[in-house]
Amino acid sequence: VDAANGLKKVVLKGPQGASAEVYLHGAHVTSWKSSAGEELIFVSKKAVFKPPKAIRGGVPVCFPQFGGFGPLQQHGFARNSAFEVVSGSADSVTLALRPDEEQLKLFQHDFLLKVMVTVGADRLEQRLSADNTGSGPLQFTTALHTYYTIDSIHNVRIEGLAGREYLDNLADKRRCTEAAPDVRFAGEVDRIYLDVPGPLRIMDGSSRGAIEVVRENLPDAVVWNPWIDKAAGMPDFGDEEYQTMICLEPAVAGSGPVELAPGATWTGAQVLSLDRLGGSKQL
Ligand code: BG6
């Protein structure tokens, strides 16, 4: 139990001093520290740790709906729900969620969602599995809505999206093509990059190196920074915090939904690793 907010969390210890923290509320990762002790995940200083509110920052699990397009509230209800611990060890935990009666009324499909989090030396792995435990087909969209802490928004860049098509959430989901060799930030960004192959890399201009994001069955990549005006409008986000965070969210969003037959299982994952030499060729 976290003394600061009374919520249950699991503290994972990886090799060489690496660690991670996962709240049972939302199966929400709120910390990933490298073997050198650096925090790689952003959590807002104004985050509210009061279920059912989702924690601002960390890695909200958006399920069974990404965004506001569908019958559910924005980003689905997994991030607002209490998960149960299924199994665990020093460096890994598996949490599970089944929709309750109220959620079933809204979503009308039964499922079992499992979230496994494993911490390694300079590595964090998050695996989702969704079982269709209902009698009809299960359709869902999803994202691992990862908030990274960065040195400065003015220096950060994301590699791996050049030439890809994206839906621009700031322009009625207009379809655009990424013309830049990498994504940089000079204002609000809210985009769903579609069917992105290969790993993505985040470089923030500091000496920590690059964070490499490898995805399995999460073909889309959402990139988000609220910038000044949206930040000012979010009560659980500091006015200046847009300068030290970005979201890069492996997802099934624009290219979705996943359709799953009764009894079938879908899995998806992100594997994050810190490449200490990978940041040097930047800027
Ligand atoms: C991103 C969306 O994934 O999440 C944005 O693309 C949204 O449009 C952001 O503003 C934050 O959402 P929320 O519900 O956590 O405030």
Image: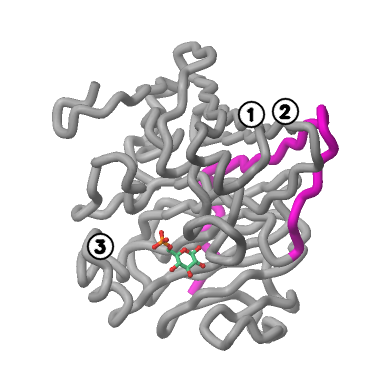
Q: How far across and how far down the image is residue 236, in percent? A: 24, 59
Q: Does the magenta stretch include residue 243?
A: no
Q: Residue at x 73, y 77 (%)?
A: 165
Q: What stretch is highlighted in magenta?
A: 255-283
Residue density around tag 3, few if under 14, some if 14–19, many if 20 or more, within 10 Å: many
Asked whether, in this view, residue 117 is left or right of residue 5, the answer is right
Residue marked by disc 3: 237
Q: What residue type is labelled 3?
A: Phe
Q: Which residue is drawn at 68% across and 34% down?
A: 130
Image quadrant in which the N terminus is located: top left
Q: Which of marks 1 and 2 is in front?
A: 2
- In the picture, the disc for residue 281 is none
Q: In the figure, 273 relative to 101: above or below?
A: below
Between 169 and 220, the one lying in front of the other is 169
| C-beta proximity under 8 Å, tags 1 and 2 | yes
Nearest to N terminus: mark 1 or mark 3: 1
Q: From mark 1 to mark 2, how far is it between C-alphas?
A: 7 Å
Residue marked by disc 1: 112
Q: How far across and how far down the image is residue 279, in percent? A: 51, 59
Q: How far across and how far down the image is residue 112, in percent? A: 63, 29
Q: From mark 1 to mark 3, how far is it between C-alphas?
A: 31 Å
Nearest to N terminus: mark 1 or mark 2: 1
Q: How far across and how far down the image is residue 131, in percent? A: 72, 30
Residue marked by disc 2: 133
Residue density around tag 1, few if under 14, some if 14–19, many if 20 or more, within 10 Å: some
